Amino acid sequence: MTATPDVTYTFVEESFSSHGVRCAARVYRPTTGGSACPVVVMAHGFGSVRALRLYAYAERFAAAGYVVVVFDYRGFGDSEGEPRQVLSIRRQHEDWRAALAYARALDDVDPRKVVAWGTSFAGGHVISLAGQGEPLAAIVAQVPHVSGPAAVRSTGLKAALKVSVLGVVDLVGSWLGRAPMLVDSVNDPGRVGMMTSPDARPGMLALIRESGLTDGDYPQTVAARIALSIGTYSPKRWAARIQCPALVQIVTHDTITPRPVAEAAAAKIPRSTVKVYEGGHFDPYVDPLFETVVADQLEFLTRNVAPIPA
C-alpha cells in the first residue's frame, strides 16, 4: 500500500474479474473516512488508459473523503485480455458493470452511494448505463460522447471513410482468425486515425506529458473494427431515463463532441447539472482548466453524494 505525503488517503493496486478476465483497479481510500464511504468508479475514454491523468482526479476525490476505483478495460492498459486494443462497446459496458459490482462489495463502501465517473467515450458509457437502470447515486459525464452521427460528422467524411474501409478489413480478418488491424487512436489532420481534429494529437501528448509518461508507455491504437460501431452508438437515447443526479461538463470548442449536441443531450436528463467551459475536448484534463473542472465535480458530489462524517 502506498501513501502520498501530506494528504489523507492511501491507494493500493487490486483487481476484479469481468467475464473471467482480470481487470486492473487502483483503489484509493481516505484515511479520515468513515466505515461506509461513498465510492467513485472511474474509467477513461476512447482507447485510453487510467494512467492518463485519471489519478489526478482520483486523488482529489479521495482527499475529500471518497473511496475511488480507477480501472482499465479488458485488453487495455494494465488489465489482461486478448487480443489487445480491441475496443468493443458491449464489452466495455460489461466491464463497467463488473467494476461497479466490485466497488459496491468493498468493505469500506456504502453500496447505496456509488458514483460512475466517465470522460469522453466513457462519459457516454455512464449515461447509457444510468439510463438503462444501473443503480447509481450520481454520474459525472465529462466531455461525453453522446451521438454517433455527430462524432462521425466531426471526424469528416473523408477521414471517416478511410477508417471505415480499414474497419471492414479488420472485421473480416477477425472472422478468419487474423490479428487485429490497429489504427492510431489520435493522429494529425489528413492522416489515418480515429480522431484527427487539429487538437487531437497535441491534446493526447499533453495528457501523456502531464501524467509523467512517455509517448511509448502505452499503445495509442485501437482495432479498426470499432469504426463500424461509432456511428450507431448514441448514449443520448438513454438520457431521459436517467433517475440519478448527473453532472455534464461541456467545452465550447469540442470538435469530438460538439457543444450543441452535448447540451441537447444534457437537457433531456431530468436531474442534470450542466457546466460549460472555454476550451477544447482535451483541455479539462490539464491545467489551467483542470482545477475548475475538478472543483465543480467535488461541489456536485458534495451536494448529491456527501461522505458520511467520520
Image: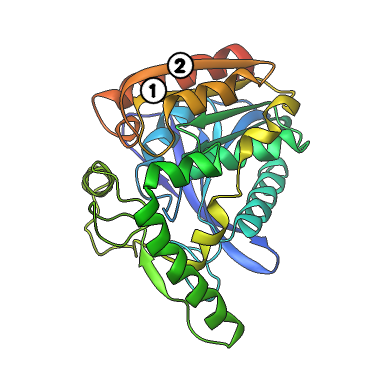
Q: Amino acid at mark 1?
A: Val
Q: Earlier in the sequence, mark 1 or mark 2?
A: 2
The label shown at residue 220 is none
Q: Position of residue 119 (x, y in %)?
A: 47, 38
The residue that label 1 is drawn on is 293
Query: From what the image shows, is residue 125 above or below residue 221?
Result: above
User: Where is residue 276, by image quadrant?
Assistant: top left
Which quadrant: the C terminus? Answer: top right
Does the CB distance between marks 1 and 2 fall below 8 Å?
yes
Is residue 68 at all visible to an observer of this figure?
A: no
Name the residue: 54% across, 61% down: 228
Q: As rendered, which of 168 and 193 lies closer to the eye?
A: 168
Task: Tell me the SS state at disc 2.
Answer: strand
Name the residue: 76% across, 34% down: 135
Foreground tag (1 vs 2)? 2
Name the residue: 68% across, 55% down: 94
User: Where is residue 124, by image quadrant?
Assistant: top right
Q: Position of residue 2 (x, y in %)?
A: 40, 47
Task: Tell me the SS state at disc 1.
Answer: helix
The extreme front residue here reads: 157
Q: Amino acid at mark 2?
A: Lys
The residue that label 2 is drawn on is 275
Q: As rendered, which of 19 and 263 lies closer to the eye?
A: 263
Looking at the image, residue 100 sits to the left or right of residue 158; the answer is: right
